[in-house]
Image: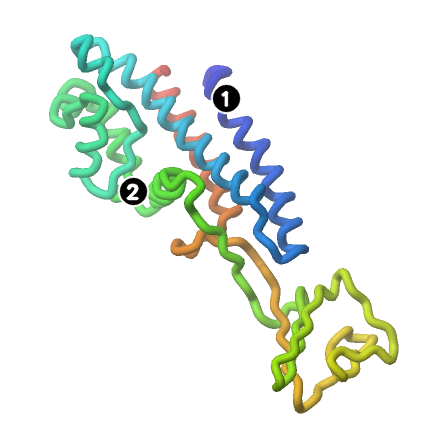
Amino acid sequence: MDSELKSMLDRASELLKELKDEYESSFETFKVTDKAKNLTHEILEKLRHALDHTMSRAWEKFIAPNLSKEKRETARVFFPIGKNLHALASILGQARIKVKDLEKNNKALYDFLLKKQPFSAKENKWLELLSKISGKGKHFRLAPQKRIQEIKSIEVSTVGGSKVKWNPSAVKFGKGIKVLGVPIDAKTQRVVPTAFVVEKVEAWVSFMFDGYGVNAFKFCNEAYTKTRALIEEMVKAFKL
C-alpha cells in the first residue's frame, strides 16, 4: 500500500482514538455531543472514500484504457456495494463497466468484487451498513442504549410528579441527607426503600445507530479494521 492510501487509513485510526475519548466523555454527561456525531461521520466517510479510491485505481488500470474519452470523462467510479446482482451491475454501470465484459475480460477482478458483496457472504454485511450510514452524511442519529441495574444514574420520583436525577460517580451524599424527603443511605448511596417514591437506576452502556441496532463505536472500529484488510488484499492482488 502506498503513502496516499496509508495516510487515509491512518487518519481514520487517529479519529477513532478521538471518538473513543468523546464517547466516554458523553457517557459522563448523559448527552450525545455534536463532536461525537461529527467524528463518527468523518471516520465512516474516510473509510468509504478509501474504498472508492482503491476501486478508482483498479478502474484506471483495467477499464479506462478501453473506454472512449467521453465515457472516461462521464464515468462515476465507486467501490461497488450492492444488495443483489442487479444493484452491483447498476453501480458498475456508472463507471461504464458492463458486468458481462468484466467477467469475460478480467474475471479475477469480477470474482473479487462479487466475493466481497454483502449478498455473497454474511461476513460482508458490514459493507452494506458502511454504505448506508456514510451515504446519509450527517443525517443519522446516535441513540443511547440503556441497561437497568447498573448504578450510573439514579432518578427518584414521587407519585405527585416531582423528580430528581443525579450521577452517583459525581455526587456523594453524607449521613442525614434526604432527596424529596427520602433518606439516602450513605454507604450504598441509594435511596432508603420508601413506599411513595420510585428509584430508577440505569446505565448508558453504548451509543447505537438509531434504526440499525448497532453499537456505533464498535462498528466504526470493526469497519476500520476490515476496510484496511480489504484494501491491502485488493492492492496486493491487482498490484495497485
Q: Quadrant of residue 64?
A: top left
Q: Is residue 2 above or below residue 44?
A: above
Q: Which comes sooner in the sequence, label 1 or label 2?
A: 1
Identify the element where label 2 is drawn. loop
Callout 1 environment at 10 Å: few (<14), some (14 to 19), or many (20+)?
some
Q: Is residue 177 above or below residue 152?
A: below
Which residue occupies 26% across, 23% down?
76
Q: Residue 144 or 13: which is nearer the viewer? A: 144
Q: Quadrant of residue 107?
A: top left
Q: Position of residue 48 (x, y in %)?
A: 40, 32
Which residue occupies 81% across, 67% down?
172
The Cα–Cα distance between marks 1 and 2, rounded to whole angstroms, is 25 Å
Q: Amino acid at mark 2?
A: Pro
Which residue occupies 65% across, 73% down?
155
Image check: 159 left or right of 62? right
Q: Amino acid at mark 1?
A: Lys
Q: Position of residue 157 (x, y in %)?
A: 64, 79
Colour basis:
rainbow
The residue to which callout 2 is attached is 118
Q: Is residue 101 above or below residue 227?
A: above
Q: Residue 133 or 8: which is nearer the viewer? A: 133
Which residue occupies 34% across, 45% down?
125
Q: Residue furthest bottom?
A: 195
Q: Position of residue 52 (x, y in %)?
A: 36, 26
Q: Which mark is residue 6?
A: 1
Callout 2 environment at 10 Å: few (<14), some (14 to 19), or many (20+)?
some
